[in-house]
């Protein structure tokens, strides 16, 4: 192209005449500096606009990348939220199952406790009834001016006297029904000889037998038992009173003549006679043939 332009230019130069040259010289004008400056300013402004557009394009591209990354993160987080939701749902279900199991266990325990409370209530009612009965007896004894142990002792003595009275009446009836005809006075039945007295501490004969040394007509310092004697047979019971009661529950010697029932002796505060003891006279000793039985209570 350069070659053609140069050839064309040469031919044009050859065709120009002097008149033509003068006309072209007259038409060409020099460019002013203001116009050059305006053109340069326009070019610079256009370059600035292009650069600004390029910068905005880069910024939009960065924003687009950021939005794309946020969308990817949101998708990932949404999946994580789904997993978390499933995990929370599973934990809630497991908690509900455990709560149901605990509820059933507590319900069974409550039923068992309810049954135990009913049984305890029945026992309390039974104890209250026994307490009311005991208080009634003690009230009766108090109204008579006696404490519980004295009342029991008096009742035992009255019972003994009643039995003795029945025996005497029976003996009188037998004598009246069988009168003696022509028998000597020595063969007539003599009345039963009764005697009251006291025994002291028993003495051991062997592992299974014990005896009292003597019968005292007067209560002495070492007396521990009240005695009723008929001929050669004696019925005895422990003496009443705090001092005698303490010896009774603490002395091993007294236990050779008494069997104890009820509460532990160390916790006992009173006693009640269940059965009289018995002793038989052999020589100068009273051999214990039957132990007395007492009931201890708090």
Image: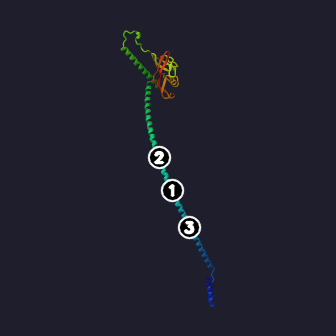
Mark 1 near mark 3, Cβ–Cβ under 8 Å? no
* Tag in front: 1 or 3: 1
> In the picture provided, is 225 more to the left or to the right than 6?
left
| Sequence-wise first label, 2 or 3 | 3
Q: CA distance from mark 1 to mark 3?
A: 33 Å
- 105 vs 82: above or below: above
Residue 178 x/y as whole percent? 36, 14
SS type, badge 2: helix
The residue nearer to you, when weighing 244 against 170, is 170
Give the class, few, some or many, for how many residues have Cα within 10 Å of label 2's Cα (few <14, many ≥20): few
Coloration of the structure image: rainbow
Give the class, few, some or many, for how many residues have Cα within 10 Å of label 3's Cα (few <14, many ≥20): few
Give the class, few, some or many, for how many residues have Cα within 10 Å of label 1's Cα (few <14, many ≥20): few
Residue 201 visible in rendering: no
Mark 2 near mark 3, Cβ–Cβ under 8 Å? no
Report the residue marked by disc 3. 61
Residue 128 x/y as whole percent? 44, 32
Give the quarter of the figure containing the N terminus: bottom right
Q: CA distance from mark 2 to mark 1?
A: 27 Å
Q: Which mark is residue 101?
A: 2
SS type, badge 1: helix
Q: CA distance from mark 2 to mark 3?
A: 60 Å
SS type, badge 3: helix
Q: Residue at x 58, y 72 (%)?
A: 50
Report the residue marked by disc 1. 83
């Amino acid at each position: 192209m350069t070659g053609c332009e140069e050839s064309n230019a040469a031919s044009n130069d050859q065709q120009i005449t002097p008149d033509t040259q003068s006309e072209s010289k007259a038409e060409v004008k020099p460019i002013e500096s203001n116009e050059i400056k305006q053109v340069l300013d326009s070019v610079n402004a256009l370059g600035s606009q292009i650069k600004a557009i390029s910068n905005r394009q880069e910024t939009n591209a960065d924003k687009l990348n950021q939005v794309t990354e946020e969308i990817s993160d949101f998708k990932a987080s949404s999946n994580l939220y789904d997993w978390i939701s499933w995990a929370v749902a599973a934990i809630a279900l497991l908690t509900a199952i455990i709560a149901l199991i605990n509820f059933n266990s507590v319900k069974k325990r409550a039923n068992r406790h309810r049954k135990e409370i009913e049984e305890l209530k029945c026992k309390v009612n039974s104890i209250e009834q026994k307490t009311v009965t005991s208080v009634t007896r003690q009230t009766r004894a108090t109204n008579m001016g006696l404490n519980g142990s004295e009342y029991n002792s008096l009742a035992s003595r009255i019972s003994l006297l009643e039995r003795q009275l029945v025996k005497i009446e029976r003996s009188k009836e037998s004598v009246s029904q069988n009168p003696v005809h022509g028998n000597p006075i020595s063969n007539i039945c003599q009345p039963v000889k009764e005697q009251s007295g006291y025994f002291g501490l028993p003495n051991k004969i062997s592992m299974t037998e014990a005896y009292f040394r003597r019968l005292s007509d007067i209560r002495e310092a070492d007396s521990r038992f009240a005695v009723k004697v008929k001929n050669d047979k004696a019925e005895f019971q422990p003496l009443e009173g705090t001092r005698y009661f303490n010896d009774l529950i603490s002395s091993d010697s007294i236990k050779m003549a008494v069997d104890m029932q009820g509460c532990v002796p160390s916790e006992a505060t009173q006693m009640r006679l269940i059965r009289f003891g018995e002793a038989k006279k052999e020589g100068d000793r009273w051999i214990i043939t039957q132990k007395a039985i007492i009931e201890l209570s708090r």
